Amino acid sequence: MNDESKELFERLGGTEAIAEIVNEMYRRVLADEELGPFFKDIPMDRVRKMQLQFLASALDGPVEYTGAELSSVHAGRGITSRHFAKFCGHFADAMEDCGASKRDVDDALARLATYKDKITGDSNVDG
């Protein structure tokens, strides 16, 4: 799945491969005792669709994310840095299981890390 000259989205295999990663990731997330409850009574087809759109956009795909602003959709849900890290761990494991290279997994996790504060509500202020 790796060709250094391609964008990360393409190196991961494009829309179909990212959709497979999203499905595998949510299988793991929903089975996780800490993360699963965040998705109780939430239409998972919509969540998967929005996650696919978000990831495709964040990973240099030809898609613009048009979903809700991340801060507002996650506000007040009690999502901590620990939850974010566990979610990213499931994402990394799903990527590896779907054939992503270590470098591509690391690159994708670095992209997701830039959204942590919006999802957890933390602020990253120096000093």
Image (cartoon, helix red, strand yellow):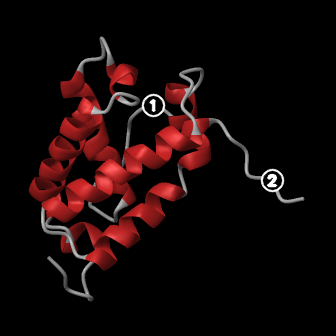
**Observer-nearest of 35 and 23:** 35
The residue sitting at the right extreme is 127
Q: Is residue 71 left or right of residue 39?
A: right
Question: Tag on residue 68?
Answer: 1
Dot 1 and dot 2 residues touching (CB under 8 Å): no
Percent coordinates x, y for residue 119 in the rendering: 54, 38
Residue depicted at x 32% and y 78%: 103
Q: Quadrant of the N terminus?
A: bottom left
Circle 2 packing at 10 Å, graded few (<14), some (14-19), many (20+), is: few
Q: Can you tell which of label 1 and label 2 is closer to the viewer?
A: 2
Question: Tag on residue 10?
Answer: none
Residue type at tag 1: Ala
User: Which quadrant of the structure image shows residue 33?
Assistant: top left
Residue type at tag 2: Val
Q: Secondary structure at mark 1?
A: loop
Q: Secondary structure at mark 2?
A: loop
Above or below, 116 relative to 79? below
Circle 1 packing at 10 Å, graded few (<14), some (14-19), many (20+), is: few
User: Which of marks 2 and 1 precedes in the sequence?
Assistant: 1
The residue sitting at the front extreme is 33
Percent coordinates x, y for residue 5 in the rendering: 26, 88
Residue that badge 2 annotates: 125
Percent coordinates x, y for residue 126 in the rendering: 84, 59
The residue sitting at the top extreme is 41
**Observer-nearest of 1 and 91:** 91
Q: Is residue 119 left or right of residue 3?
A: right
Above or below, 123 relative to 46? below
**Observer-nearest of 35 and 8:** 35
Residue depicted at x 24% and y 31%: 31
User: Which quadrant of the structure image shows residue 30?
Assistant: top left
Q: Is residue 39 left or right of residue 10?
A: right
Q: Quadrant of the C terminus?
A: bottom right
